[in-house]
Image: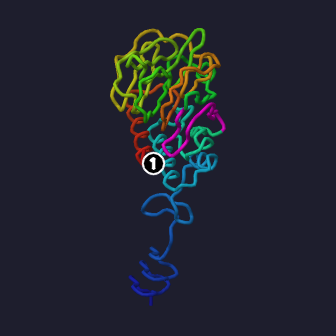
Amino acid sequence: MANSNGWGDGAANNNIGWGQGANNAIGWGSSHATSWAGATDISGAPTTDPDAQAFITAASITNPTQQSAINDLVIGLKADGLWTKTKAVYPFVGGSATSNSYNLKNTAQYQLSFSGGATHNSNGYTGGVNGYANTGLNPNTAFITNDSFHMSIYSRTNSILDGADLGGINASARTDLWLRSSDGNCYNRVHLNGIVTANANSTGIYISTRNSSTSLKLFKNNSQLGSTYTGANGARLDVNMFLGAYAVGTTPTYYSQRNYAFASIGDGLSDAESTNLNNRINTFNTTLGR
C-alpha cells in the first residue's frame, strides 16, 4: 500500500519521502549542485569568477584570503558595471614583483614592468629612490576619445615631495596625478591642463575622472578634492604611463617612493561609479588587512 506521507523508508510512491523512497517527490537525502548559500561547483565549494581565476593562476596566488578577496573584487566590479570600464586594474596582491605586475582585467595585457629599487610585500608595491613601473598603457592608442578617462590610485604613504604617482608628459599632452608635491598641492591633469588643489595628506584612495571635454573631477576617499575643471581637455597623452614616477617621453623622473595598494586606468566614471569604485577598493584592502 502506498503511503501519502512516508516517514520511514516509505513505499515506492511516497509523495514526500523522508527516507530513500524510489519515487519521492522531494528527496531530503539528495545533494544539490546549488545550495541554499548560492552557486557552488559539483563538490559543493563556492565557484570562482573565471577572470578572477585567470589572475589567481597567472600571479600564483595561493593564500585563501587573497584568493577570496580577488574573487569578491571582480564580482563586485562586474555587479557595479565597472569591469567593462577598466583597461588596467592593479590590485598589488601576492607580495612579489611577479604577482604585483599582473593586470587583473587582462593578465596578457598592460603587465607592469618594474625598474630600479622597489619593495614588494603584503602591503603592495613601494618605489625606491629610482624605482617605478611602466604600465605599457599609452592613452593615445588605448582610448578612442579624449572625453572619457579615469585613473585611480590608493596611496598608503603620507609624504610631501616632488614625485609623480601616475602619468607622463609628451610634446602636446600630459596626464598625471601628483598626490602631494613640495608646495603642499595635489596636481591632476588629463590630456593637458586640470586641477590644482591643496592636499594636507597624501594617503587615501584617489579617483580622477573625465566624462566630457569640459569636466574633470578628482575624488579622495569619496569626497571631491578641489573644484571641477571645465577647461578644454587637449590631446591625449602619447607615451606609456608610469606608476611611481613621471614619464617624460620614455624617461622616468620625479620618483614618488610611496606605497601603493591599488591602481586602475580606464574609461570615465560618473560620480556614483566613482563612489562604487572607491568602496570596492576599500573593501578589497580591508579584507587584506591593509
Residue at the spot x=50%, y=74% of the render? 30
Residue 283: give x, y in percent of width and height: 40, 44
Residue at the spot x=49%, y=41% of the render? 78
Asked if residue 123 lies in the magenta stretch, the reply is yes
Label 1 neighbour load within 10 Å: few <14, some 14-19, many 20+? some
Residue 7 falls in which quadrant of the image? bottom left
- The image shows a total of numbered marks equal to 1
Q: Residue furthest right?
A: 108
Q: Is residue 77 found left or right of 99 in the rendered image? A: left
Display coloring: rainbow
Residue 15: give x, y in percent of width and height: 43, 78
The quadrant the N terminus occupies is bottom left
Image: 235 above or below 120: above
Q: Is residue 172 found left or right of 225 in the rendered image? A: right
| Residue kind at label 1, given as amino acid type | Leu
Asked if residue 105 lies in the magenta stretch, the reply is no
Q: Is residue 5 found left or right of 89 in the rendered image? A: left
Q: Which residues are magenta?
A: 108-127
Image: 268 above or below 107: above
Q: Residue furthest bottom?
A: 1
Image: 22 above or below 212: below
Query: SS class of the residue under badge 1?
Result: loop
The quadrant the C terminus occupies is top left
Q: Nearer the viewer, residue 91 or 11?
A: 91
Residue 233: give x, y in percent of width and height: 49, 12
Residue 131: give x, y in percent of width and height: 58, 30
| Residue on which disc 1 sits | 288
Q: Is residue 282 found left or right of 46 in the rendered image? A: left
Q: Nearer the viewer, residue 110 or 184?
A: 184
Residue at the spot x=49%, y=62% of the render? 34
Q: Nearer the viewer, residue 22 or 111?
A: 111
